[in-house]
Structures are given as structure tokens and as C-alpha cells.
Image: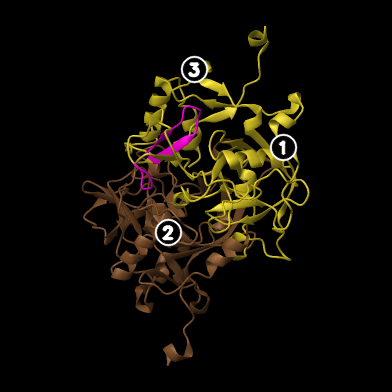
Chain colours: A brown, B yellow
Amino acid sequence: MLSFLLALLQTAVPASSDALPADWRAIPDDEVVVMTLADGGRVVIRLAAGRAAGHVANIRKLAVKKWWDAGGSVYRVQDNYVAQWGDVTEKKPLPADVEANPPAEYEWQGEAPVAKLTRRDPYAEWAGYTRDGWPLAGSGASQWLPHCYGMVGVARDLAPSTGSGGDLYAVIGHGPRALDRNIAVVGRVVEGIERLSALPRGTGDLGFYKAPAETPMAIRSVRLASQMPAAERPRFQYRATDNPRFAAWIKTRENRQPPFFVVPAGGADICNAMPPVRRAPPVTADAAR
Amino acid sequence: MLSFLLALLQTAVPASSDALPADWRAIPDDEVVVMTLADGGRVVIRLAAGRAAGHVANIRKLAVKKWWDAGGSVYRVQDNYVAQWGDVTEKKPLPADVEANPPAEYEWQGEAPVAKLTRRDPYAEWAGYTRDGWPLAGSGASQWLPHCYGMVGVARDLAPSTGSGGDLYAVIGHGPRALDRNIAVVGRVVEGIERLSALPRGTGDLGFYKAPAETPMAIRSVRLASQMPAAERPRFQYRATDNPRFAAWIKTRENRQPPFFVVPAGGADICNAMPPVRRAPPVTADAAR
């Protein structure tokens, strides 16, 4: 039962769906958030710049002010749903320039997808991709970021609260798409999601850790990459979606390949066809010359 | 950010979508498999009796013969995909009456859904429910069990291998529906999925644990409930799907309720609308009289 799996690894051959080097584009340092947990685990999040602007601005301010460093924790882990972090006391004051409830930019108009999946999904008339490497869903005139595995949203109280961004969650189960358009999606975990998804589940209501036997995982620090010394910044790239190679890649996700897959699906769920993001490869002597 | 969540718990009021006592029907003891891990964690699986019959028969035989008890382990945990268990050595002989490769009953004909979701999904023309409380997907004349969170499948080598059932996996991430119709789905974890989903991820290829730093989680025992002393058997019930209360329940999954949800989706993914299963409530003195 192992051999087939390992054999599959050897079937990767260059194909029309492969990216060219120029298809990989740098993610700016001020879109990259590095959260380090007390156990040393590192979770790297790409912020969805240009969407949910008020919430993204808040998160940048909170990182710059090191707001999560003192007392922040991952305090709720609910199986097949979310891991949530921030201020479990609900009492820590926000910095003066952080808005408690930014406008509810849960959906917007006028952003056409650069590429689309073949089939509609149950939560949107279409699902596809933005130019800058985000999954996107839409119905009628509206578009939004879908709640897929690893996507990051802003915990909130009942409306009209939209949440400040001080408490965030990452999806660690089947994409809870019913949350789409009901909450601000602000980013995506691009590295280290397993540091959240493999945490013990809380046994309290909704996965809250239940004292005294269960304790939240403390947050050591949260930083924007742009705050870190240049040599220490993790550098990431997204795969550009505006080219025929990406269109071919979509088809490979919709019709998985033999020899393991015998019946192709003819379609895919956006959460099973997430746009690729990777660590920037080291600059070689040749390229730097 | 906590208060809203706790407040939500108090919004549960009887509704037309609530089950009547008679809607809960017993799951037979020979459909219930109890896997106990070395750390004491218990994972309970309902077998999909009547589907993938050769594989389900093998699993029953392997449990009765205690095949997994000596040397069995959870040896592969791949984030956002599966936790897999069985014989990591690939060398343990199967009992003589266990077929190494039963027929590939990955899909079948003639099973009409008792209830359906409103919208199609990207992997099937329709998604819905069987009479006995399973999720079901279908296209054309075919039906199959979808790869949703918690569903259990049979690891296999390249076709024509179908796997014996000695190595199994449970889905611990976004439903990898591309596997539908390509592999035998034999059950669903009905309790204790978090004992698998919160295991450390393996850092080897495909989530295999990498020696010597990482070690598989040993399996202490695997038993059919029908093998256990009557007093020790866990008893489960599925919610019947053939009644208007269940139809109303589907609508509540497709249109989540205020006050937290403001924009209803109008549809749901079958993996976000899994048919309810629960522990049988204790028999009260009244009922037993």
C-alpha cells in the first residue's frame, strides 16, 4: 500500500501545465505575516491586499505594534472547522489607530476572474482566480474570497460587528463555505498550517480550550515580513493565473491523471484547486550575476 | 470575540427541521468498528454495509481475526488529506479467507437518493442521501459515496489493485472528491475523528512518518461492536432521511440562520451537510418499562 504512493511521486514530468520561471511572482513583504508559536512552530500568512482593506490595515498595525506578542494565544481549535487566535480575555485594548469594526467588505463588485473552473459550485455561480493568485467566487455582480482550507478570516461578534482583526481564524477542515459573504476573509496560510491543524482540539463548546486541563498555545510573536531584518524575511511567490499554462493546470486539477486516477471528475471544487504559492527559490550565482 | 460564539449556542430552539425520536434509527452492531490507539484514543467507524461489499466483508474478517492488533499502526498523516493505518511493513499475510483485491465496487447503479441537495456539485450531477443515512453522489446512472471529511476508504496500489481493506484511510481535510469513483469507500468515522486529525503530520513523502524522529501511532485493537461484550458496545443511531423533517433540515444547512449568518448561501456542499449520526441516548427507566 505504500509502493503505489511512492511510485506516484515519480510520475511528475514537465507538461503544458507546468509554470515557467516568469510565472512565479514575488509576494510583497508587507503582505506576509509570520506568526511564531510558543512551541517554535511558524505559521506564515499572506494578506489579501486590496480586499477587506480596513481589516487588512488593522492587522498590519497590530503586527507592527506587536499587539499579539503579549498574551496572544491560539485558544480555540474546533475539529473540521477552525483554529482561532488572538486575545482570549476579550479585554486587551486595541491601539488607538485600529478601528474596532471596519466596514463589512465581505464581498465587492467589479473584479473579474482571470481564469475560471469549468463547473459552478454550490455556493457561487462561478469559482476561479484573481490575477494575483487568490481563489475567487462570485454570483451576480458580486465577488468574494471563499472559505477554503487554510484561508484566514476575522472572528466577529453578531452583526453589525465585523471584528477588528485582533482575533483571527484559519480553516482546518472542509471549507465552511456558508461563512462566505458573512465574515471578512483577509488572507491564507501559505506555510505551516499543520502547526494549527494538528493542535489538540479543545473540548469546550466550539472547540475552546477548557481550563485547567487544556491550555491555549501561546503566541511568541507576530510580525510583518517587512518588519523583519531583510536577511530573515521569508520570501514567497504566487503563480500567475493569466497565462495558458495556468489554464492547462486547472484542467489537470479537474481531471486527475492516470495511472492512479482511472475516472476523471471533469470538474473540481475551488478548495481542491487552490492557486499555487511557494517559497521563492534561492537566487543562484548565475541569476544574481 | 468569544461572546458571540457562546451566544449562538443559545439560539437552538425546536424547529420543523428537528428530528422526532423515531427518526433516530439504530446502527447494527456489525456495522460498527471500534479502533483503539496506543494512546487510548478511540475511533469509531460505521461500515457502509451494502456497498463495496467485498471490501466491507474483508474488514469484518480482519477485525474478527484481530489482524490489526499485532503490529498495526497509523503510519501516514498528510495534512489536508488523509490519516492512513494498517500494516506499514506491507508484509503481513492476510488471513486465508480475505480476498487481496475484491471487485472494484467504486460506483453502482439503481440506488435512488431519498433526499437531494438543491444544487449540483463540481464532482457529480447531484448529491443527496441514502435511506440509511449515507451521503450519496451521482451522475448519469451511477451512484457512489463521496470523499467527505471523516469518510473512510481503502488504500490501494495502482489498478487493477483495489486494496484488501487491511490498509484504510480517513479524510482529515477538505473532501478530496477527485478520489470519488477511483477507490473503495467503506465507511465513515462517527466518533473520535480528532484522534486521527490532530495527530502530528508525517514529514516524509505523502505524510509518511519519517524514522527515527517520527513514529507511527500503534493500534491497540480493532473490533466490531458485535464482537464486544454487549455491555461494552458503543451504540449509534443515524437520522432517517425519508421524512419532511429531514428535508427541512437540508434547507437549514443550505441557508444558515440569523443572527450570525446574514447572507444565506442558497445551497450547500454535501460535505458540509453530512447526515447526522449520534450516540444512542441511554434507555430511560420509563422507556424500558
Classed neighbour count for the residue bearing mark 3: other residues with Cα under 10 Å, few (<14), some (14–19), many (≥20): few
Gap in Å between the C-alphas at discs 1 and 2?
35 Å
Write the residue at 50% across / 59% down: A260
Residue in front for this viewpoint, B62 or A246: B62
Question: Is residue B3 covered in magenta?
Answer: no
Classed neighbour count for the residue bearing mark 1: other residues with Cα under 10 Å, few (<14), some (14–19), many (≥20): many
Q: What mark, if any, has residue B20 been given in the picture?
A: 3
Q: Amino acid at mark 2?
A: Arg
Position in image of residue A40 (x %, y %)? 63, 63
Q: Secondary structure at mark 2?
A: loop
Pointer 1 indicates a residue of which chain? B
Stretch in magenta: B121-138
Write the residue at 47% across / 57% down: A261
Q: Is the Cβ of the residue at disc 3 closer than 8 Å to that at disc 2?
A: no
Q: Secondary structure at mark 3?
A: loop
Position in image of residue B285 (x %, y %)? 68, 10
Q: Which residue, given by chain and number where applicable, does mark 2 sit on?
A: A256
